[in-house]
Image (spheres, rainbow, N blue to C red):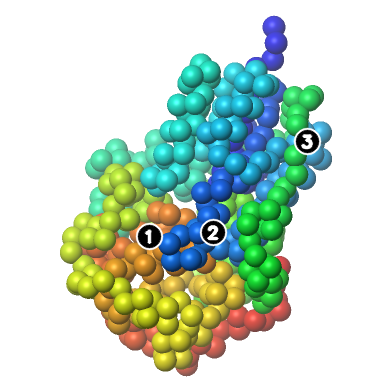
Amino acid sequence: MESKVTLIWFRNDLRFHDNEILFETVSKSPIIIPVYCFDPRYFSKKSSGHRKTGVHRARFILDAVRELKEKFVAMGCDLMSFVGYPEEIIPRLAAKYEVNEVFHHREVASRETIISENVETALWKLKINLKHFIGHTLYHKEDLPFPIRDIPNDFMVFKKKIERESTVRQPFPTPEVMVTHPHLEKTTIPTLEELGYTTEEIQTANNNPIHLRGGEDEALKKVEEVLSGQFNEQLDYMMLSPYIAAGALSPIYLYHKIKDAKLVLNKKRTEKLTAQLLWRDYFRFMLKKYPNVFFKKNGTGKSEYSNVETNPEDLKKWQSGQTGYEFIDKAMQFLSQTGNLPSDIKKIVSLFFVQEYQGDWRKGASYFEDMLIDYAPATTYGYWAHYAGVGTSIKNNTPASWEVQMKNSYPNGLEIPFFDQNIVA
Protein backbone atom coordinates (compact mmCIF):
# COMPACT_ATOMS: atom_id res chain seq x y z
CA MET A 1 0.00 0.00 0.00
CA GLU A 2 1.36 3.40 -0.97
CA SER A 3 2.01 6.00 1.71
CA LYS A 4 -0.49 8.78 2.15
CA VAL A 5 0.67 12.09 0.66
CA THR A 6 -0.29 15.24 2.57
CA LEU A 7 0.29 18.74 1.26
CA ILE A 8 0.76 21.36 3.99
CA TRP A 9 -0.29 24.82 2.91
CA PHE A 10 1.55 27.27 5.15
CA ARG A 11 0.08 30.72 5.73
CA ASN A 12 0.40 32.52 9.08
CA ASP A 13 1.85 29.50 10.86
CA LEU A 14 5.55 29.68 10.01
CA ARG A 15 6.98 27.51 12.77
CA PHE A 16 7.91 23.98 13.80
CA HIS A 17 7.08 24.26 17.52
CA ASP A 18 3.47 23.80 18.63
CA ASN A 19 2.23 23.14 15.11
CA GLU A 20 -0.62 20.63 15.11
CA ILE A 21 -0.47 20.17 11.35
CA LEU A 22 3.14 19.00 11.46
CA PHE A 23 2.45 16.88 14.53
CA GLU A 24 -0.46 15.09 12.87
CA THR A 25 1.28 14.44 9.58
CA VAL A 26 4.48 13.20 11.19
CA SER A 27 2.67 11.03 13.74
CA LYS A 28 0.96 9.21 10.91
CA SER A 29 4.21 8.96 8.92
CA PRO A 30 2.85 10.16 5.60
CA ILE A 31 4.82 11.82 2.83
CA ILE A 32 4.49 15.57 3.31
CA ILE A 33 4.75 18.35 0.76
CA PRO A 34 5.19 21.77 2.43
CA VAL A 35 4.12 24.79 0.33
CA TYR A 36 4.03 28.55 0.84
CA CYS A 37 2.39 30.96 -1.62
CA PHE A 38 3.30 34.63 -1.91
CA ASP A 39 -0.17 35.73 -2.94
CA PRO A 40 0.01 38.85 -5.21
CA ARG A 41 -3.24 40.10 -3.65
CA TYR A 42 -1.34 40.83 -0.44
CA PHE A 43 1.47 42.73 -2.13
CA SER A 44 -0.56 44.90 -4.50
CA LYS A 45 -1.33 48.59 -3.94
CA LYS A 46 -4.56 50.11 -2.69
CA SER A 47 -6.26 53.13 -4.23
CA SER A 48 -4.43 55.21 -1.58
CA GLY A 49 -1.11 54.26 -3.17
CA HIS A 50 0.01 52.27 -0.14
CA ARG A 51 0.66 48.55 -0.35
CA LYS A 52 -1.51 46.03 1.45
CA THR A 53 1.75 44.70 2.87
CA GLY A 54 4.35 47.35 3.60
CA VAL A 55 7.98 46.65 2.85
CA HIS A 56 8.90 46.12 6.53
CA ARG A 57 6.36 43.32 6.92
CA ALA A 58 7.26 41.85 3.54
CA ARG A 59 10.90 41.53 4.55
CA PHE A 60 9.87 40.08 7.92
CA ILE A 61 7.76 37.42 6.17
CA LEU A 62 10.56 36.63 3.72
CA ASP A 63 12.89 36.05 6.67
CA ALA A 64 10.40 33.68 8.30
CA VAL A 65 9.70 31.69 5.13
CA ARG A 66 13.41 31.46 4.34
CA GLU A 67 14.18 30.08 7.79
CA LEU A 68 11.31 27.60 7.59
CA LYS A 69 12.68 26.35 4.29
CA GLU A 70 16.14 25.95 5.80
CA LYS A 71 14.71 23.86 8.63
CA PHE A 72 12.90 21.57 6.23
CA VAL A 73 16.03 21.18 4.09
CA ALA A 74 18.08 20.31 7.19
CA MET A 75 15.69 17.38 7.71
CA GLY A 76 16.11 16.17 4.16
CA CYS A 77 12.79 17.75 3.21
CA ASP A 78 12.00 21.06 1.51
CA LEU A 79 9.50 23.92 1.47
CA MET A 80 8.31 24.87 -1.99
CA SER A 81 7.49 28.55 -2.43
CA PHE A 82 5.68 30.26 -5.29
CA VAL A 83 4.51 33.73 -6.23
CA GLY A 84 0.91 33.27 -7.30
CA TYR A 85 -2.64 32.49 -6.27
CA PRO A 86 -3.08 29.54 -3.88
CA GLU A 87 -6.30 28.43 -5.61
CA GLU A 88 -4.21 27.85 -8.75
CA ILE A 89 -0.96 26.60 -7.22
CA ILE A 90 -2.26 24.21 -4.53
CA PRO A 91 -4.57 22.18 -6.85
CA ARG A 92 -1.85 21.95 -9.52
CA LEU A 93 0.63 20.53 -7.02
CA ALA A 94 -1.99 18.26 -5.50
CA ALA A 95 -2.71 16.73 -8.88
CA LYS A 96 0.95 16.48 -9.88
CA TYR A 97 2.07 14.70 -6.70
CA GLU A 98 -1.09 12.61 -6.23
CA VAL A 99 -1.88 14.27 -2.91
CA ASN A 100 -4.49 12.59 -0.72
CA GLU A 101 -5.29 15.56 1.50
CA VAL A 102 -4.33 19.21 2.04
CA PHE A 103 -3.87 20.65 5.55
CA HIS A 104 -4.03 24.31 6.51
CA HIS A 105 -4.86 26.59 9.44
CA ARG A 106 -8.24 28.30 9.33
CA GLU A 107 -8.43 32.10 9.32
CA VAL A 108 -11.36 34.31 10.32
CA ALA A 109 -11.19 37.53 8.26
CA SER A 110 -13.19 37.66 5.03
CA ARG A 111 -10.33 37.97 2.55
CA GLU A 112 -8.47 35.04 4.05
CA THR A 113 -11.65 32.98 4.33
CA ILE A 114 -12.58 33.59 0.70
CA ILE A 115 -9.13 32.46 -0.44
CA SER A 116 -9.52 29.26 1.60
CA GLU A 117 -12.93 28.68 0.04
CA ASN A 118 -11.47 29.17 -3.44
CA VAL A 119 -8.76 26.61 -2.72
CA GLU A 120 -11.30 24.20 -1.24
CA THR A 121 -13.55 24.50 -4.29
CA ALA A 122 -10.67 23.85 -6.68
CA LEU A 123 -9.51 20.84 -4.65
CA TRP A 124 -13.01 19.44 -4.43
CA LYS A 125 -13.09 19.19 -8.24
CA LEU A 126 -10.11 16.85 -7.86
CA LYS A 127 -11.90 14.98 -5.05
CA ILE A 128 -9.24 16.11 -2.57
CA ASN A 129 -10.19 17.30 0.91
CA LEU A 130 -8.92 20.55 2.47
CA LYS A 131 -8.66 19.89 6.20
CA HIS A 132 -8.91 22.91 8.49
CA PHE A 133 -6.95 23.23 11.73
CA ILE A 134 -7.34 25.77 14.53
CA GLY A 135 -3.91 26.90 15.65
CA HIS A 136 -3.81 30.68 16.01
CA THR A 137 -5.45 31.33 19.37
CA LEU A 138 -4.37 30.91 22.97
CA TYR A 139 -7.55 29.05 23.92
CA HIS A 140 -8.80 26.42 21.51
CA LYS A 141 -12.32 27.00 20.25
CA GLU A 142 -13.36 23.54 21.44
CA ASP A 143 -12.24 24.37 25.00
CA LEU A 144 -14.29 27.53 25.40
CA PRO A 145 -16.99 27.43 28.12
CA PHE A 146 -19.52 28.69 25.57
CA PRO A 147 -20.30 28.23 21.86
CA ILE A 148 -19.13 30.99 19.53
CA ARG A 149 -22.63 32.47 19.25
CA ASP A 150 -22.80 32.91 23.05
CA ILE A 151 -19.36 34.42 23.66
CA PRO A 152 -19.78 37.42 25.99
CA ASN A 153 -19.36 40.69 24.15
CA ASP A 154 -17.91 42.38 27.21
CA PHE A 155 -14.17 41.71 27.22
CA MET A 156 -13.81 41.53 31.01
CA VAL A 157 -16.68 39.03 31.28
CA PHE A 158 -15.06 37.01 28.48
CA LYS A 159 -11.67 37.18 30.23
CA LYS A 160 -12.91 36.19 33.68
CA LYS A 161 -15.08 33.36 32.45
CA ILE A 162 -12.47 31.89 30.13
CA GLU A 163 -9.71 32.07 32.75
CA ARG A 164 -11.95 30.49 35.37
CA GLU A 165 -13.54 27.73 33.28
CA SER A 166 -11.02 26.92 30.54
CA THR A 167 -7.41 25.83 30.34
CA VAL A 168 -4.65 26.50 27.84
CA ARG A 169 -3.49 23.34 26.11
CA GLN A 170 0.09 22.15 26.16
CA PRO A 171 2.17 22.84 23.01
CA PHE A 172 2.49 20.09 20.42
CA PRO A 173 5.95 18.47 20.28
CA THR A 174 8.38 19.71 17.65
CA PRO A 175 8.89 17.07 14.91
CA GLU A 176 12.34 15.58 14.52
CA VAL A 177 11.91 13.48 11.36
CA MET A 178 9.98 14.15 8.16
CA VAL A 179 9.61 12.34 4.86
CA THR A 180 8.87 14.20 1.67
CA HIS A 181 8.27 13.40 -1.99
CA PRO A 182 11.55 12.47 -3.73
CA HIS A 183 10.88 14.60 -6.81
CA LEU A 184 9.76 17.98 -5.55
CA GLU A 185 10.09 20.99 -7.81
CA LYS A 186 13.07 23.18 -7.01
CA THR A 187 11.91 26.61 -5.97
CA THR A 188 13.53 29.69 -4.48
CA ILE A 189 12.35 32.34 -2.05
CA PRO A 190 11.50 35.51 -4.02
CA THR A 191 13.26 38.80 -3.40
CA LEU A 192 11.57 42.06 -2.48
CA GLU A 193 12.18 43.18 -6.06
CA GLU A 194 10.40 40.10 -7.38
CA LEU A 195 7.44 40.89 -5.13
CA GLY A 196 7.21 44.31 -6.78
CA TYR A 197 8.90 46.61 -4.26
CA THR A 198 10.82 49.59 -5.60
CA THR A 199 14.43 50.50 -4.91
CA GLU A 200 13.21 53.35 -2.70
CA GLU A 201 10.97 51.05 -0.67
CA ILE A 202 13.75 48.52 -0.20
CA GLN A 203 16.13 51.27 0.90
CA THR A 204 13.57 52.29 3.52
CA ALA A 205 13.57 48.72 4.84
CA ASN A 206 17.37 48.59 4.84
CA ASN A 207 17.54 51.80 6.87
CA ASN A 208 15.23 50.45 9.59
CA PRO A 209 16.95 51.36 12.90
CA ILE A 210 15.43 48.41 14.79
CA HIS A 211 15.02 45.79 12.08
CA LEU A 212 13.63 42.62 13.62
CA ARG A 213 14.63 39.51 11.74
CA GLY A 214 11.70 37.25 11.05
CA GLY A 215 11.65 33.55 11.75
CA GLU A 216 11.03 31.00 14.47
CA ASP A 217 14.54 30.94 15.93
CA GLU A 218 14.55 34.71 16.39
CA ALA A 219 11.05 34.51 17.89
CA LEU A 220 12.13 32.00 20.54
CA LYS A 221 15.20 34.11 21.27
CA LYS A 222 13.03 37.21 21.75
CA VAL A 223 10.80 35.30 24.19
CA GLU A 224 13.79 34.57 26.40
CA GLU A 225 15.02 38.17 26.18
CA VAL A 226 11.62 39.65 27.02
CA LEU A 227 10.95 37.28 29.89
CA SER A 228 14.38 37.91 31.37
CA GLY A 229 13.44 41.57 31.68
CA GLN A 230 15.94 42.73 29.08
CA PHE A 231 13.67 45.38 27.55
CA ASN A 232 11.75 48.35 28.82
CA GLU A 233 8.34 47.04 29.92
CA GLN A 234 6.56 49.12 27.29
CA LEU A 235 8.51 47.29 24.58
CA ASP A 236 7.72 43.74 25.78
CA TYR A 237 4.77 42.91 23.55
CA MET A 238 6.08 45.02 20.67
CA MET A 239 9.09 42.68 20.46
CA LEU A 240 6.89 39.57 20.33
CA SER A 241 3.70 40.50 18.47
CA PRO A 242 5.24 40.46 14.96
CA TYR A 243 6.28 36.84 15.44
CA ILE A 244 2.84 35.88 16.76
CA ALA A 245 1.17 37.57 13.78
CA ALA A 246 3.33 35.64 11.30
CA GLY A 247 2.83 32.41 13.22
CA ALA A 248 6.55 32.11 13.96
CA LEU A 249 5.65 32.15 17.66
CA SER A 250 2.82 30.15 19.20
CA PRO A 251 0.69 32.07 21.73
CA ILE A 252 0.32 28.80 23.67
CA TYR A 253 4.08 28.37 23.89
CA LEU A 254 4.46 32.00 24.96
CA TYR A 255 1.72 31.66 27.59
CA HIS A 256 3.45 28.73 29.29
CA LYS A 257 6.79 30.53 29.16
CA ILE A 258 5.16 33.58 30.78
CA LYS A 259 3.81 31.39 33.58
CA ASP A 260 7.27 29.95 34.13
CA ALA A 261 8.78 33.45 34.25
CA LYS A 262 6.67 34.77 37.11
CA LEU A 263 9.61 34.59 39.49
CA VAL A 264 11.69 36.74 37.14
CA LEU A 265 9.21 39.41 36.09
CA ASN A 266 6.76 41.11 38.44
CA LYS A 267 3.16 39.96 38.44
CA LYS A 268 1.81 43.11 36.82
CA ARG A 269 4.21 42.75 33.90
CA THR A 270 3.33 39.11 33.19
CA GLU A 271 -0.38 39.86 33.53
CA LYS A 272 -0.03 42.63 30.98
CA LEU A 273 1.54 40.25 28.48
CA THR A 274 -1.16 37.63 29.08
CA ALA A 275 -3.88 40.26 28.66
CA GLN A 276 -2.51 41.07 25.20
CA LEU A 277 -2.91 37.42 24.23
CA LEU A 278 -6.47 37.37 25.58
CA TRP A 279 -7.42 40.50 23.65
CA ARG A 280 -6.04 38.84 20.54
CA ASP A 281 -8.24 35.76 21.18
CA TYR A 282 -11.23 37.97 21.90
CA PHE A 283 -10.98 39.82 18.60
CA ARG A 284 -10.66 36.60 16.59
CA PHE A 285 -13.63 35.00 18.32
CA MET A 286 -15.71 38.16 17.94
CA LEU A 287 -14.97 38.24 14.22
CA LYS A 288 -16.19 34.67 14.08
CA LYS A 289 -19.33 35.53 16.06
CA TYR A 290 -20.05 38.69 14.05
CA PRO A 291 -18.55 38.19 10.56
CA ASN A 292 -16.85 41.30 9.22
CA VAL A 293 -17.98 43.45 12.17
CA PHE A 294 -14.59 45.12 12.59
CA PHE A 295 -14.50 46.23 8.96
CA LYS A 296 -17.82 48.10 9.05
CA LYS A 297 -17.76 51.86 9.59
CA ASN A 298 -20.46 51.75 12.27
CA GLY A 299 -19.54 48.32 13.67
CA THR A 300 -21.97 47.55 16.47
CA GLY A 301 -23.23 51.11 16.76
CA LYS A 302 -22.81 54.68 15.55
CA SER A 303 -19.43 56.34 16.01
CA GLU A 304 -19.41 59.96 17.08
CA TYR A 305 -16.14 60.22 15.19
CA SER A 306 -17.53 59.06 11.82
CA ASN A 307 -19.93 61.86 11.00
CA VAL A 308 -17.90 63.26 8.11
CA GLU A 309 -15.62 61.94 5.41
CA THR A 310 -11.93 61.87 6.22
CA ASN A 311 -10.11 64.96 5.03
CA PRO A 312 -7.32 63.70 2.70
CA GLU A 313 -4.96 66.41 3.97
CA ASP A 314 -5.54 65.44 7.61
CA LEU A 315 -4.91 61.79 6.74
CA LYS A 316 -1.69 62.69 4.94
CA LYS A 317 -0.44 64.83 7.85
CA TRP A 318 -1.14 62.02 10.32
CA GLN A 319 0.52 59.37 8.17
CA SER A 320 3.65 61.42 7.53
CA GLY A 321 4.00 62.68 11.11
CA GLN A 322 3.27 66.32 10.34
CA THR A 323 0.28 67.02 12.59
CA GLY A 324 2.06 69.67 14.63
CA TYR A 325 1.82 67.57 17.81
CA GLU A 326 5.35 66.47 18.72
CA PHE A 327 4.45 63.18 20.42
CA ILE A 328 2.15 62.08 17.59
CA ASP A 329 4.60 63.13 14.90
CA LYS A 330 7.55 61.32 16.48
CA ALA A 331 5.48 58.16 16.89
CA MET A 332 4.16 58.18 13.32
CA GLN A 333 7.62 58.83 11.90
CA PHE A 334 8.92 55.93 13.94
CA LEU A 335 6.13 53.72 12.56
CA SER A 336 7.11 54.65 9.01
CA GLN A 337 10.79 53.96 9.69
CA THR A 338 10.31 50.62 11.47
CA GLY A 339 6.83 49.19 10.91
CA ASN A 340 6.43 48.82 14.66
CA LEU A 341 5.04 50.63 17.70
CA PRO A 342 4.38 49.69 21.34
CA SER A 343 0.72 48.89 22.02
CA ASP A 344 0.03 51.94 24.17
CA ILE A 345 1.46 54.27 21.53
CA LYS A 346 -0.66 52.59 18.84
CA LYS A 347 -3.62 53.44 21.04
CA ILE A 348 -2.60 57.07 21.47
CA VAL A 349 -1.99 57.79 17.78
CA SER A 350 -5.22 55.95 16.85
CA LEU A 351 -7.25 57.95 19.37
CA PHE A 352 -5.65 61.14 18.06
CA PHE A 353 -6.79 60.27 14.55
CA VAL A 354 -10.41 59.50 15.42
CA GLN A 355 -10.80 62.29 17.98
CA GLU A 356 -9.02 65.14 16.22
CA TYR A 357 -9.96 64.41 12.61
CA GLN A 358 -13.33 62.71 13.20
CA GLY A 359 -13.49 60.96 9.84
CA ASP A 360 -13.73 57.32 8.82
CA TRP A 361 -11.59 55.47 11.36
CA ARG A 362 -11.03 52.68 8.82
CA LYS A 363 -8.65 55.00 6.95
CA GLY A 364 -6.37 54.92 9.95
CA ALA A 365 -6.76 51.17 10.38
CA SER A 366 -5.99 50.68 6.70
CA TYR A 367 -2.74 52.61 7.09
CA PHE A 368 -1.81 50.37 10.02
CA GLU A 369 -2.54 47.40 7.78
CA ASP A 370 -0.01 48.74 5.31
CA MET A 371 2.69 49.62 7.80
CA LEU A 372 2.67 47.26 10.78
CA ILE A 373 4.82 44.15 10.78
CA ASP A 374 2.49 42.70 13.42
CA TYR A 375 -0.65 43.36 11.39
CA ALA A 376 -3.44 40.84 11.94
CA PRO A 377 -6.91 41.62 10.54
CA ALA A 378 -9.01 40.86 13.61
CA THR A 379 -6.64 42.47 16.13
CA THR A 380 -5.72 45.60 14.19
CA TYR A 381 -9.23 46.46 13.04
CA GLY A 382 -10.72 45.25 16.33
CA TYR A 383 -8.70 47.75 18.35
CA TRP A 384 -9.47 50.56 15.93
CA ALA A 385 -13.20 49.81 16.09
CA HIS A 386 -13.08 50.20 19.88
CA TYR A 387 -11.13 53.43 19.66
CA ALA A 388 -13.78 54.75 17.26
CA GLY A 389 -16.58 53.75 19.63
CA VAL A 390 -18.07 50.95 17.52
CA GLY A 391 -16.36 47.86 18.92
CA THR A 392 -18.09 44.82 20.36
CA SER A 393 -17.15 45.40 24.03
CA ILE A 394 -19.20 48.50 24.85
CA LYS A 395 -17.29 49.43 28.01
CA ASN A 396 -14.09 49.54 25.96
CA ASN A 397 -15.64 51.83 23.37
CA THR A 398 -15.25 55.03 25.37
CA PRO A 399 -11.56 55.45 26.25
CA ALA A 400 -10.21 58.70 27.63
CA SER A 401 -8.94 61.33 25.25
CA TRP A 402 -5.65 60.76 23.51
CA GLU A 403 -4.09 63.54 25.56
CA VAL A 404 -5.09 61.88 28.83
CA GLN A 405 -3.77 58.54 27.58
CA MET A 406 -0.50 60.18 26.56
CA LYS A 407 -0.02 61.97 29.89
CA ASN A 408 -0.79 58.79 31.84
CA SER A 409 1.58 56.59 29.86
CA TYR A 410 4.28 59.10 28.93
CA PRO A 411 4.23 62.02 31.38
CA ASN A 412 7.73 63.04 30.28
CA GLY A 413 7.13 62.68 26.57
CA LEU A 414 8.44 60.07 24.16
CA GLU A 415 11.55 58.98 26.04
CA ILE A 416 11.53 55.22 25.52
CA PRO A 417 14.96 54.23 24.15
CA PHE A 418 13.59 53.07 20.77
CA PHE A 419 16.99 53.25 19.12
CA ASP A 420 18.89 51.42 21.84
CA GLN A 421 21.13 48.94 20.02
CA ASN A 422 20.07 46.25 22.49
CA ILE A 423 16.78 45.86 20.64
CA VAL A 424 18.29 45.49 17.20
CA ALA A 425 17.94 41.86 16.07
**Residue linked to disc 3:** 186
Q: Amino acid at mark 2?
A: Thr
Figure quadrant of residue 361 = bottom left
User: Gap between marks 2 and 1, in whole Å?
Assistant: 15 Å
Mark 3 and 2 residues: CB-CB less than 8 Å, in contact? Answer: no
Picture residue at 64% right of the left edge, 27% below the top: 93
Q: Position of residue 339 (x, y in %)?
A: 56, 69
Most foreground residue, 51 or 260: 51
Q: Amino acid at mark 1?
A: Tyr
Note whether 376 is above or below 117 in the view shown. below
Figure quadrant of residue 144 = top left
Task: Find numbered disc 3 in the image and state the secondary structure of the residue it sits on.
Answer: loop
Note whether 135 is above or below 4 in the view shown. below
Marks 1 and 3, the one that precedes in the sequence = 3
Q: Which tag is nearer the camera, tag 1 or tag 3?
A: 3
**Residue linked to disc 2:** 53
> In which quadrant of the rendered image does the C terminus lie?
bottom right
User: Gap between marks 3 and 2, in whole Å?
Assistant: 26 Å
Marks 2 and 1, the one that precedes in the sequence = 2
**Residue linked to disc 1:** 381
Q: Which tag is nearer the camera, tag 2 or tag 1?
A: 2
Mark 2 and 1 residues: CB-CB less than 8 Å, in contact? Answer: no
